[in-house]
Image (tube, rainbow, N blue to C red):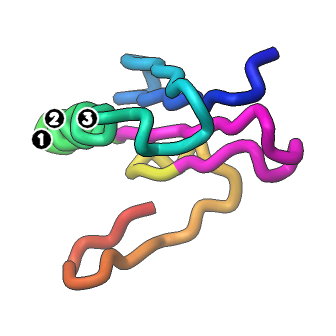
Amino acid sequence: MIHDQLRFRVWVGGELVREDWLPGATLEAGGDLGHVHAGLASEAEAAGEAWLVEVYDPAAPADDGYLRFGSDTSGMVCPVAVVLIGSDDVAQ
């Protein structure tokens, strides 16, 4: 099992479109990966598709290993609306 990496998965329209593992358990190791994932989310929204990003930390306790966000609430557990600071947009 990999203990020093974070896994990112991106779904668009319920289909897995990208999976990345970051070396080390920090976001700094990802470089432009956040921009790539944001681009996929923007393209999905422009096409009218729901999207979901999942971050998995295998080193975290079992109940805290996953973080999911996006507009596709069907892949989330107990989704909560989030209002972005300085924006009128609401994200899940």
Q: Nearer the viewer, residue 48 or 52?
A: 52
Magenta stretch: includes residue 61: yes
Q: Quadrant of the C terminus?
A: bottom left
Q: CA distance from mark 3 to mark 2?
A: 17 Å
Q: Position of residue 9 (x, y in %)?
A: 49, 28
Label 2 environment density (alpha carbons within 10 Å; few <14, some 14–19, many ≥20): some
- In the image as oriented, which residue stretches furthest toward the right? 62
Instruction: Quickly name the residue at label 2.
Output: 43
Which amino acid does the dot numbered 2 rest on? Glu
Instruction: Quickly name the residue at label 1.
Output: 46
**Label 3 element class:** loop
Compared with 18, 77 (above or below) is: below
Q: CA distance from mark 2 to mark 1?
A: 5 Å
Residue 62 quadrant: top right
Which amino acid does the dot numbered 3 rest on? Asp
Residue 16 quadrant: top left
Instruction: Quickly name the residue at label 3.
Output: 32
Classify residue 79 as left or right of residue 19: right
The answer to whether the residue labelled 2 contacts the one labelled 1, judged by CB atoms less than 8 Å apart, is yes
